[in-house]
Structures are given as structure tokens and as C-alpha cells.
Image (cartoon, rainbow, N blue to C red):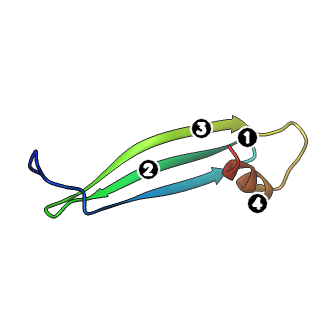
């Protein structure tokens, strides 16, 4: 990747995951250059699951709202 190389396109990719103990989300940014593709971690967040019993699908939905 040269110093003067321009970004052809970029995109954001979000991943969410949950378990009985916590839920989390991670956001990556992907840059596409003419000679290569570069992916960088943009931001992550997590939270401990509520004390009240909640289903895993519900926790995954909560992870999208972090």
C-alpha cells in the first residue's frame, strides 16, 4: 500500500454475541485499496447480563443496542 494510494471503498461490519453471563458488540471498519484490503477494529463494548433470567436471543438483541 503506497502513501498516495486512495481508498476505493470502505464498509462497517458489526458483530454481536451473547451468553448467559454477558453480551457484547464489536465494530470493524474495512478499507479496500487497489492493492490490498485492510481491516481495523473500530470499537467494542460489553455488558454483564441482567440478574433476571433472559433468553439468549433477547440478550443478542440487547447487544445490538450497546
Labels 1 and 3 touching (C-beta < 8 A): no
Q: How far is disc 3 from disc 2 in space, using C-alphas?
A: 12 Å
Q: Is residue 61 left or right of residue 10?
A: right
Quarter residue 66 falls in:
top right
Badge 4: residue crowd in 10 Å (few <14, some 14–19, many ≥20)? few
Lateral position of residue 10 relative to residue 22, left or right = left
Q: Tell me which residue sits at (47%, 57%) in the image.
A: 13
Q: Earlier in the sequence, mark 3 or mark 4?
A: 3
* Circles 2 and 1: CB atoms closer than 8 Å: no
Q: Is residue 42 above or below residue 36?
A: above
Disc 4 marks which residue?
57
Distance between mark 1 and mark 3 Cα atoms: 14 Å
Front of the two marks 1 and 3:
3
Is residue 43 or residue 59 the one in the foreground? 43
Q: Secondary structure at mark 4?
A: helix
Mark 3 nearby-residue class (10 Å; few <14, some 14–19, many ≥20) = few
**Percent position (x, y) of residue 45?**
59, 38
**Which mark is in front, 3 or 4?**
3
Q: Nearer the viewer, mark 2 or mark 1?
A: 2
Determine the image quadrant of residue 46: top right
Camera-side mark, 2 or 4: 2
Residue 63 location, x and y as percent?
A: 69, 49
Q: Is residue 44 above or below residue 64?
A: above
* Residue 45 numbered mark, or none: 3
Q: Considering only vertical position in the picture, is 33 above or below 20? A: below
Residue under label 1, please give it.
21
| Relative image position of residue 38 (x, y in whole percent) | 27, 53
Q: Which mark is first along the chain, 4 or 2?
A: 2
Mark 2 to mark 4 CA distance (whole Å):
22 Å
Which label number is shown at residue 28? 2
The residue sitting at 8% across, 49% down in the picture is 2
Amino acid at each position: 500500500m503506497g502513501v498516495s494510494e486512495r481508498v476505493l471503498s470502505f464498509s462497517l461490519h458489526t458483530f454481536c454475541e451473547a451468553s448467559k453471563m454477558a453480551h457484547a458488540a464489536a465494530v470493524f471498519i474495512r478499507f479496500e485499496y487497489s492493492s490490498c484490503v485492510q481491516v481495523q477494529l473500530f470499537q467494542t463494548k460489553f455488558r454483564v447480563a441482567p440478574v433476571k433470567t433472559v433468553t439468549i436471543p433477547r440478550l443478542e438483541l440487547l447487544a445490538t443496542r450497546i
